[in-house]
Image (tube, grey):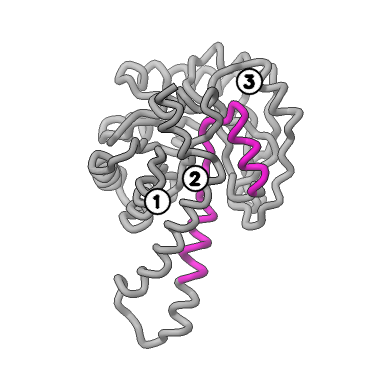
Amino acid sequence: MLVTLNDVLKHTKSGGFAVPAFNIFGFEDANAVVQAAEELKAPVILATNKVAIAHTPIEVLGKMLTELANQANVPVVVHLDHGNDYETVAQAIDVGYSSVMYDGSQLSLKENIKTTKEIVKMAHAFSIPVEAEIGSVGYTNPAMGMKEMLTDPQEAREFALETGVDALAVAVGTLHRMEEQTAPIQYDLIKEIESQTDIPLVLHGSTGVADEDLIRISRTNFGKVNIGTALRMAFGNTLRNILEENPEQYDRMELFKEPIKQVKSTAKNKIKLLNTHKYQTALQV
């Protein structure tokens, strides 16, 4: 069933779990993630980033994902990841996304607050929750020119109060597109941020987070945990092996069978680490 971000985050703090947001790029991986969630009876977030909507028009992608969510027997959020302007966010809402992120993390604090407030006003008029970012989660490739800056707890408080966002992405040690699980999570910083704001926190770049840290993070105020590279690695590495072992094979459906199985397996593992299957228990409390 298609639900909003607020629907799945409202129980995360008291329930001791977090909900993974998996970056997906098409039907096959989106369907694999939903199947993983259904088998574990857990909610899940299907997220599309700038690369995905540049490859597939947001009108097409949005309609496909919302229909997939409506057919699922678990709560599914369809989320715009890292929307970088008013028009893109508005377009996502118009085609049925049930959650949006506006990313003004590269702006000054003042400008980020100003623009985020405008996004929140527009999205809330349609009852769509908004995630935004304070501090900046950088990328492993410095050539991308994206600044990296840990979140200041006082700025997190000011930003949350001024903008009225529903979820707050913060930088506490991760980077986007990490391939090794070596992110140095700053737990003292997390505690300081939690002392300044009680809205659900969001962790980006979570492929780089060690398994034991994912378990620990699920017990904090982090309600949403973004994972993308792990799925792409599962798919790409498996596909490379299939092609090497079967050089005569050219059928897309045959080639994708095992890679998609690995995507599903990776998604299930992350769901389990984040204790997301505790969602049903939380609803009964």
Rendered position, 141 above or below 108: below
Q: In the figure, residue 45 lies in which quadrant?
A: top left
Query: Can residue 212 be seen here?
Result: yes
Disc 2 element: helix
Instruction: Point out residue 91 in the picture as x, y percentages from the top left corner.
Output: 31, 34
Query: If you read the primary sequence from the N terminus, does the residue marked by circle 2 or circle 1 appear first?
Result: 1
Measuring 71% from the left and 24% from the top, which residue is drawn there?
191
* Three-letter code for the amino acid on which mark 3 is drawn: Ala
Instruction: Point out residue 124 in the picture as x, y percentages from the top left corner.
Output: 36, 18
* Three-letter code for the amino acid on which mark 1 is drawn: Ala
Mark 1 sits on what residue? Answer: 36
Query: Can residue 133 be seen here?
Result: no
Q: What's the CA distance linking mark 2 and mark 3?
A: 27 Å
Q: Is residue 252 left or right of residue 138?
A: left
Name the mark on residue 156: 3
Spot the residue most to the top: 161
Q: Please report the bounds of the magenta region as a residue range.
A: 211-238
Query: If you read the primary sequence from the N terminus, does the residue marked by circle 2 or circle 3 appear first?
Result: 3
Mark 2 sits on what residue? Answer: 271
Disc 1 element: helix
Please state which of residues 76 and 274 is positioned toward the viewer in this rendering.
274
Instruction: Point out residue 217 in the picture as x, y percentages from the top left corner.
Output: 63, 36
Q: What's the CA distance linking mark 2 and mark 1?
A: 8 Å
Within 10 Å of the Cα at label 2, are there few (<14), some (14-19), or many (20+) other Cα atoms?
Answer: many
Query: If you read the primary sequence from the N terminus, does the residue marked by circle 1 or circle 3 appear first?
Result: 1
Please state which of residues 257 and 228 is positioned toward the viewer in this rendering.
257
